[in-house]
Amino acid sequence: MRDQLLGGRYRLVRQLGEGGMGQVWEAQDESLGRRVAVKVISLLAGGGSHGTEARARFLREARITARLQHPNIVTIHDLGETDTGDNRAPFLVMELVRGEGLDAKLRRGVVTLPEAARWGIQICDALADAHDAGIMHRDIKPSNILVTPSGAVKVLDFGVARAADPYATADRLTQTGFIVGTPPYMAPEQARGFPEPRSDLYALGCLLFELITGQLPFRAPDTVGYLSAHLTQAPPTPSSVSTGIPPAWDSLVLTLLHKDPDERYPNAATLSQALRQLDHTHVPTTAGPSRIPPHMEPRAALLAQLATAMRAAHGVGATRIPDALSRTQHVLRQLDHAPEPAPPAPESTPSPTMPGTTPLAEVITQRSTRVLEPEPLRHHLTSEDDPGTKPGPYPRRSAVRTATAVTALVCLLTVQVIPFAAAQAVDTGEITSDERTVQMVLFGVMAAVLAIGVLLLLVRNTAGRWLIMAGGIGLALQAVNAMLFFNWIGLALRGVLPLAAVTAALSVILAVLSSSRSRRQRPR
């Protein structure tokens, strides 16, 4: 069907997916000059009076669904029939959404409780708008939920399962031989042929169960087994399937999975409010502040700072990296001009709690006798101590170390463009989602290695230089690899990717220079 022109207007470009009802294509709207998504319902293809009647009913149902206008619902632009004689099939023209289905995210296992809550809230908002318009979805499942790169949810195929039922009549929703919906997510009353709006909430309960536990509430070998389980079996609590799930989540999901619709949440708006409360509930990760021995304070502070740097380097948000850069530059200035350490506290002074938010510079300054070089060696190294230097203060190694750390941090800032380039490469079909996943894992490892190297460099650990070398080489290669897609990525990325490659390579060069200078100047 590639290059086929539907309705004299929509030229099919490439197939995006295929399911039981038909195929989804990316198409070019030649009238408006924009890309759209076209869903061809091949299930209803065919001649004869029965096929003609089924297609007419589908288009009639689709016109009702097309009235929905909501930010979390994929908009239907147009509908029609393919012009292929006896094999005519109806098609829907929808907005083309760049995103990833929840089924793909579940396969990667990257869903967290806050993400599940936020996605559930947006699905509820879409369902509430549709239910108010008298439209049920009837097929809520992961593959019908798209998440855009910005985190927005788009719900697909509202009412399509009902409209595509070739056996539906005016007074029955289904007949033997066709099930409207997907059995693993189907409410008991829907399995009996009598769905209602709260049937969509039951399906959403199955979806939320799968998001937070990684598996469905019921397991069965076939359709009959799933329907029997929904009708007769009690669902397990999510916390019995996966650890770390709070009781509030157990209560919400089990309420949605009641066999009796009257025992579930009354409507999608009420469920949305319950999910918002879960999303804003703070769950402590520890029972209280940890007390550590005084001699472990510097290491604890470094570990806390390391965790912060790794989160910033791994794409938590580009706005946090400049802040990390300025904080580290301040630390470097204090390292080069640190005053004499204060006398140690008396033995009777109680040990402080873990300094998870204590600035790194303060901890290093307070414990400089344990972590840093002795003051005379740092500031008064002369030719007697090192034949390769001139008498007087010794700023060379500090300057090289400062330049290495600053360049590495600038590298961490600029390489954040690599995930965006990979996402655009997936959108244009240059690489697959699996290839992108591998690239993002490597990117995360290399960024973390570089961040660890910077922190070790700050405390004069020679291993930091080697980690900066390794991380810089890896990130430089990834940036160069992303540059291969110049013809398919946006103009903004074309300027930042070379900068990312250059800063990564420069951090490696400075780390090598720093390492070689240290070897030449080491006392014999």
Image (cartoon, helix red, strand yellow):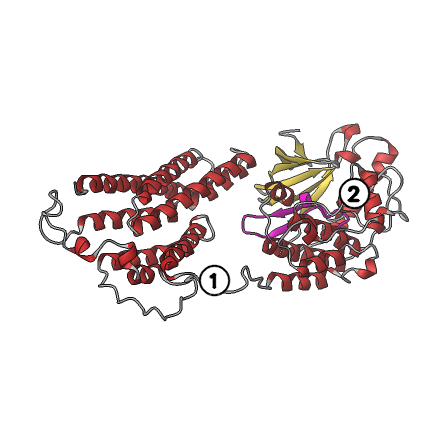
Label 2 neighbour load within 10 Å: few <14, some 14-19, many 20+: many
N-terminal-most mark, 1 or 2? 2
Find residue 59 and name its label: none
Q: From the viewer's perspective, is residue 161 above or below residue 337?
A: above
Q: Is 55 displayed left or right of 315 in the figure?
A: right
Amino acid of disc 2: Pro
Asked whether 45 or 219 is in front, the reply is 219
Check the image and name the residue furthest to the right. Answer: 171
For residue 20, which quarter of the picture? top right
Determine the residue positioned at 37% across, 70% down.
Answer: 349
Determine the residue positioned at 30% across, 63% down.
Answer: 366
Res 71 seen here: no
Determine the residue positioned at 35% across, 40% down.
Answer: 472
If the image is split into quadrants, where does the N terminus sit? Answer: top right
Q: Position of residue 53 (x, y in %)?
A: 85, 39
Tell me the CA gap for discs 1 and 2: 48 Å
Res 513 seen here: yes
Q: Position of residue 241 (x, y in %)?
A: 69, 49
Q: From the viewer's perspective, is residue 509 above or below residue 186?
A: above
Q: Is 278 displayed left or right of 288 in the figure?
A: right
If the image is split into quadrants, where does the C terminus sit? Answer: top left
Say if the magenta span includes residue 356.
Answer: no
Amino acid of disc 1: Ser
Q: Which residue is mark 1?
A: 290
Under tag 2, what secondary structure? helix
Find residue 183 and name its label: 2
Instruction: Specify start and end residues of the magenta stretch as a single range.
Output: 135-157
